[in-house]
Image (cartoon, coloured by chain):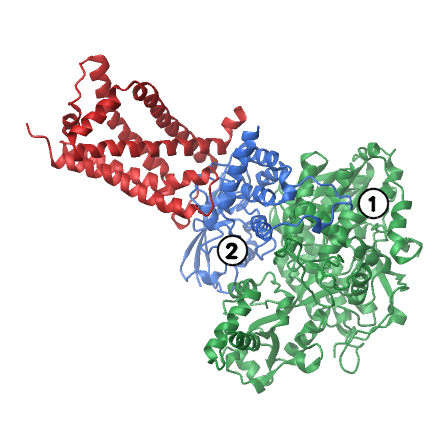
Chain colours: A green, B blue, C red
């Protein structure tokens, strides 16, 4: 238990961070020049951390598997970034942002971390604006805000539907400035394969140059893992194709605890799978649920006819439609939170009411909104008795103005006009709240090894609110790590450069080479994707939107068996010392096959339903999540013991002194 | 759908490449172009051949990784999308599709369809940023009001995904649209004005050093840009460059 | 300074400026030529003035020649640089899908105009130089009209002139407006500049073609 000290500073919640910053050790600027830091991953968290650390004077090396730091998947975030600026004067405050985030996370995150997040959120906006991030503005020239789900204030800053892109380019610019100064050395098309420990401290990594296949040794006084989430273990997700857990998982295997692996967010509005060839899923902004009504056919035979293409949804009479969210949750209707909406869609589709050829889709229908808007518009135009076509035309114009780009994106992918036929949507994996366990300083259980952004577990509890991922990534990178890492590095000012020709590096490199050789030596019968897809199906069916003891136990067994088969039958073509995408994929899938098992174990162990983790055994008579604060108010931090099945769980009890624990209800 | 593919294969940067023919059957219209290549690769692997390497990542048109020249056009026959957003329903049964990497001397081929776009990195490193430290004491975000029009124009320039389609489309392999998008983003904002003269000169110098061609205003880049970055940005960069040079 | 000369944008601006200068020169040229159709007397007067005025001969003429040389030399240098920038060629390249033919073939249209200029220099400039300086003939303010018309007597030369002017038209069609974009002008006037370019690129070469055909069809009778 000694290892799981969260190092939360004492004192009142609102003063903890300031107090901590005042008390921690600093490194003198002249000494920073002699200290090296490795940052793995260059998304919002890694990119901002690398730039800030280099500004301070540390020698930074960054690693990303993409051909440029700018391509990290933070770039795909659409909606926005939260900050408690209270520019709208609607009563927002650090406390409110803190409270919303804790509650949204279903009371499974750390108060002190979340409060700090809220506290620095305003600085993020200032910093990004200073960098030239072109946020949306009002006509008066000041920054615009929009509202997001789950909160009562307007605190989301945005840049059209490309907020993540603009913020990442800001961090990338800050990195470029340091690269130009020689303070960052950027290794692109490089993948971290292992963490190197010297005397129990993180002192470097083994990386593979993905172009030449060369195995490289890089040493540093501290290592930051900011490699994102592990949602791609589901195969189909809204993650980018390259997203993987390798850096985090191999750090875990070297001793870092992995926290709450089963906490995954499944987003309700994604474009459904169209066939076996599908490689990834595309998110449609949550904002669509403001105007779209979700439904499936009431009768099984109608659903079947629609699945077979014999019936068009527009031909179905109003009384034959089941607006199941409005039926089940009359108060919130179509605007229930993400986890609830996702589970309800799955429930209907599992019962056979799905509406596309695979039976895994529900309708998101804008007909009612088009009619409503059309009538309103006609009325304001002075038309007393407009005909149907006019109403429709006017209504479509309004809907286009609001959601035009999304509708167009949908039409490109699905080849159906969503103004005329209802959209088809289905939930998809898109974020993992779980990750490497870190203390208040963002340090893992390995001294000198830090973790930031989605890769750590710290701030979102069991469910993340919209527009909070960008906030957390940048808070960690710009405003938390640069301070806290100094506290640790202050002891390293006399260490000098870490040599890479030591036994520790030899051993780590040898292990990495053996693993690669093993992968290439199997030459079995199945491709890497074959295993990845199989794993994805197990995860989706048994560890997805709702879970139960029986299936989780099956999943644990099946994943272990699949992993065994993988190592006996996988076929990886090509060579180790050349560009080899299949080899890259194989290494990543090998790790997914391990974390998948831990994921299921964690879900099995947590006998409650909270946030994105829904256990069928633990629900109210109405089918709602039943949290167990008495027994499960903790962070489950897993220690690796040679095999996922031997992993040992450590508990970090969560203490709530500033909020009252409540049940969420949306009826 | 049955398709005849002609695909550029090249072992590595040093080896000479060539076009190789593949025939694919059972291609569905719902497949994205890259998923079609995934299916082809699965077949190749099982047949004991080396799969075709191509760059891709987000598969939703924002990361800018995918970079295929399809039937002589960057990102294929449609405009305003990247390859990953192109679907096979755009093609007909029996079509022949020629797939090549984006071609430019500054974008050497790494393997098969994968190119090295680090030239773009170096152009950005030469000045594509505002020099501001992360202190937590920066002025309040609303202390600098910015005209909405200018902010929107700056945003439009900033939506560049750095894919290189502009270079690939240009008969001169010019990188002016890419470079000008970044120069414009900052030139339009008060935060970026301070370093504007240095920025444009450094970035243009680096662009020239990388061996890109010159802009002859054909407008091909603007047509093929998946994000619709406007030629106005090139004019703006030229202006910025002229006035920076005049200032000396 | 050397950095400036090497810069692609600076070179492009040299192209734009020299091009615009030649565009203006064309107006002067076509105006004088039109006189040959309207009134041979006036044509002779203007031509004589241009041929013997010190300012024209020793200042404007060298500037014009420099303008032409710079436009062609820099243009050709840029073309070589542009060709090198591609390295390996595309197996399939659909340039027509995203850019008009005229904009992609400036080197061709310009090259033809350059070849034509060779003929044109041979026909008129070399002839003038020989007449004035080598043979040292006396001034004859009335010779120009007849000499000019005589040039258009052969069918082959007239056809060459007509073809060259068509290509000049294509060159101007892209080049004129393009020079504004290069100099950084892309604003609310751009649509107007583009329209004007189209009119200019049609009217000026058509006038030259008209003059050539007119003289071909109306030879001077002796």
- Please tell me which residue is depicted at 59% across the width and 67% down the height of the picture: A271
Measured Cα–Cα span from mark 2 to mark 1: 42 Å
In which chain is the residue bearing label 2? B
Q: Position of residue A484 (x, y in %)?
A: 84, 46
Q: Does residue A363 appear anywhere in the picture?
A: yes
Left or right for A50, reference C100: right
The disc label shown at residue A465, or none: none
Which numbered mark, 2 or 1, is in the foreground of this view? 1
Horizontal placement of A294 versus A53: left or right? left
| Both marks 2 and 1 on one chain | no
The residue indicated by pointer 1 is A483
Q: Give the farthest residue toward the bottom.
A: A319
B153 or B217, which is in the foreground? B153
Q: Residues within 10 Å of mark 1 (few under 14, many from 20)?
A: many
The residue at 74%/41% (across/down) is B133
Q: Position of residue A326 (x, y in %)?
A: 67, 80
Q: Secondary structure at mark 1?
A: helix
Residue at figure coordinates x 30%, y 40% from the top left = C169
Image position, residue A155 (x, y; %): 72, 60
Q: Provide the residue designation for mark 2.
A: B81
Q: Chain of mark 1?
A: A
């Amino acid at each position: 238990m000694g290892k799981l000290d969260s190092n939360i500073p004492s004192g009142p919640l609102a003063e903890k961070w300031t107090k901590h910053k005042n008390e921690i050790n600093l490194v003198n600027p002249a000494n920073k020049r002699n200290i090296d830091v490795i940052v793995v991953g260059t998304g919002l968290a890694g990119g901002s951390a690398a730039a800030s650390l280099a500004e301070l004077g540390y020698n930074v090396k960054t690693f990303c598997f993409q051909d440029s730091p700018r391509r990290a998947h933070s770039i795909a975030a659409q909606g926005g970034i939260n900050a408690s600026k209270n520019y709208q004067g609607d009563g927002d405050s650090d406390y409110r942002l803190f409270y919303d985030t804790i509650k949204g996370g279903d009371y499974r995150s750390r108060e002190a971390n979340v409060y700090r997040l809220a506290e620095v959120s305003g600085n993020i906006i200032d910093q990004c604006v200073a960098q030239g991030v072109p946020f949306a503005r009002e006509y008066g020239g000041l920054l615009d805000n929009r509202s997001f789900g789950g909160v009562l204030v307007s605190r989301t800053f945005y840049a059209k539907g490309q907020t993540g892109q603009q913020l990442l380019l800001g961090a990338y610019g800050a990195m470029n400035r340091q690269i130009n100064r020689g303070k960052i050395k950027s290794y692109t098309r490089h993948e971290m394969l292992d963490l190197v420990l010297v005397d129990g401290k993180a002192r470097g990594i083994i990386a593979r140059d993905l172009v030449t296949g060369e195995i490289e040794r890089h040493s540093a006084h501290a290592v930051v893992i900011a490699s994102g989430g592990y949602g791609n273990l589901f195969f189909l997700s809204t993650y980018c194709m390259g997203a993987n857990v390798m850096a985090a998982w191999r750090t875990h295997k070297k001793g870092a605890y992995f926290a709450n692996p089963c906490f995954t967010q499944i987003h309700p509005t994604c474009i459904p799978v169209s066939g076996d060839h599908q490689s990834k899923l595309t998110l449609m902004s949550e904002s669509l649920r403001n105007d779209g009504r979700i439904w499936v056919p009431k009768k099984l035979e109608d659903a079947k006819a629609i699945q077979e293409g014999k019936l068009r949804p527009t031909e179905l009479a109003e009384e034959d439609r089941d607006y199941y969210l409005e039926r089940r949750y009359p108060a919130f209707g179509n605007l229930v939170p993400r986890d609830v909406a996702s589970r309800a869609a799955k429930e209907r589709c599992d019962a056979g009411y799905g509406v596309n050829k695979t039976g895994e889709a529900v309708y998101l229908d804008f007909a009612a909104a088009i009619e409503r808007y059309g009538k309103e518009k006609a009325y304001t135009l002075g038309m007393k008795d407009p005909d149907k076509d006019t109403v429709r035309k006017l209504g479509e114009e309004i809907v286009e103005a609001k959601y035009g780009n999304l509708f167009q994106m949908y039409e490109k992918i699905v080849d159906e006009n969503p103004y005329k036929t209802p959209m088809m949507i289905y939930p998809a994996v898109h974020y993992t709240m779980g990750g490497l366990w870190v203390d208040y300083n963002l340090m893992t259980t390995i001294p000198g090894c830090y973790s930031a952004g989605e890769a750590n577990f710290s701030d979102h509890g069991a469910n993340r609110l919209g527009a909070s991922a960008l906030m957390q990534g940048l808070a960690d990178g710009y405003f938390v790590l640069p301070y806290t890492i100094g506290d640790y590095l202050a002891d390293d000012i006399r260490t000098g450069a870490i040599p890479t020709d030591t036994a520790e590096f030899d051993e780590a490199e040898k292990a990495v080479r053996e693993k690669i050789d093993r992968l290439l030596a199997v030459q079995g019968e199945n491709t890497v994707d074959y295993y990845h897809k199989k794993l994805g199906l197990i995860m989706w069916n048994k560890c997805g939107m709702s879970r139960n003891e029986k299936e989780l136990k099956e999943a644990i067994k099946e994943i272990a068996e699949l992993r065994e088969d993988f190592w006996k039958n996988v076929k990886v073509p090509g060579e180790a010392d050349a560009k080899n995408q299949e080899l890259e994929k194989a290494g990543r899938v090998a790790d997914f096959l391990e974390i998948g098992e831990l994921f299921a174990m964690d879900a099995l162990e947590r006998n409650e339903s909270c946030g994105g983790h829904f256990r069928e055994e633990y629900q109210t008579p109405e089918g709602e999540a039943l949290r167990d604060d008495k027994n499960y108010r903790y962070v489950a931090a897993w220690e690796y013991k040679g095999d996922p099945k031997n992993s040992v769980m450590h508990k970090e009890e969560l203490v709530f002194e500033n909020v009252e624990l409540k049940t969420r209800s949306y009826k | 759908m049955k398709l005849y593919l002609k695909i550029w294969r090249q072992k590595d940067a040093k080896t000479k490449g060539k076009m190789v023919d593949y025939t694919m059957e059972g291609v569905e219209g719902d497949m994205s172009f890259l998923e079609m290549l995934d299916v082809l690769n699965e077949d190749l692997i099982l047949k004991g051949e080396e799969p075709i390497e191509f760059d891709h990542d987000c598969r939703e048109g924002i990361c800018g990784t995918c970079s295929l020249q399809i039937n002589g056009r960057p990102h294929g026959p449609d405009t305003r999308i990247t390859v990953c957003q192109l679907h096979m329903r755009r093609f007909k049964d029996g079509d022949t599709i020629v797939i090549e990497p984006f071609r430019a001397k500054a974008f050497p081929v790494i393997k098969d369809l994968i190119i090295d776009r680090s030239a773009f990195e170096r152009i950005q490193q030469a000045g594509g940023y505002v020099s501001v430290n992360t202190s937590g004491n920066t002025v309040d975000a609303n202390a600098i009001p910015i005209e909405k029009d200018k902010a929107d124009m700056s945003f439009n320039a900033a939506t560049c995904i750095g894919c290189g389609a502009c270079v690939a489309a240009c008969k001169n392999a010019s990188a002016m649209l890419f470079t000008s998008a970044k120069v414009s983003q900052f030139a339009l904002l008060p935060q970026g004005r301070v370093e504007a003269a240095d920025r444009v000169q450094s970035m243009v110098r680096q662009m020239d050093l990388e061996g890109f061609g010159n802009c002859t205003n054909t407008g091909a880049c603007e047509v093929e840009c998946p994000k619709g970055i406007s030629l106005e940005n090139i004019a703006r960069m030229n202006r910025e460059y002229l006035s920076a040079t005049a200032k000396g | 300074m050397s950095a400036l000369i090497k810069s692609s944008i600076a070179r492009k601006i040299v192209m734009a400026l020299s091009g615009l200068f030649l565009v203006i020169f064309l107006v002067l040229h076509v105006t004088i030529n039109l006189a040959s159709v309207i009134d041979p007397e006036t044509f002779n007067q203007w031509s004589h003035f241009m041929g013997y005025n010190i300012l024209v001969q020793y200042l404007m003429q060298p500037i014009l020649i420099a303008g032409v040389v710079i436009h062609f030399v820099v243009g050709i240098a840029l073309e070589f640089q542009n060709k090198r920038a591609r390295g390996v060629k595309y197996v399939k390249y659909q340039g027509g899908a995203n850019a008009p033919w005229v904009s992609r073939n400036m080197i061709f249209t310009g090259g033809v105009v350059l070849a034509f200029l060779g003929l044109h220099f041979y026909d008129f400039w070399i002839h003038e130089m020989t007449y004035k300086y080598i043979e040292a003939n006396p001034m004859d303010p009335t010779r120009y009209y007849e000499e000019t018309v005589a040039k258009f007597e052969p069918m082959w030369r007239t056809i060459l002139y007509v073809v060259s002017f068509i290509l000049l038209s294509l060159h101007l069609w892209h080049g004129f407006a393009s020079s504004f974009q290069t100099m950084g002008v892309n604003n609310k006037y751009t649509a107007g500049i583009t329209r004007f370019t189209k009119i200019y690129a049609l009217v000026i070469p058509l006038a030259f073609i008209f003059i050539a055909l007119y003289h071909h069809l109306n030879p001077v009778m002796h």
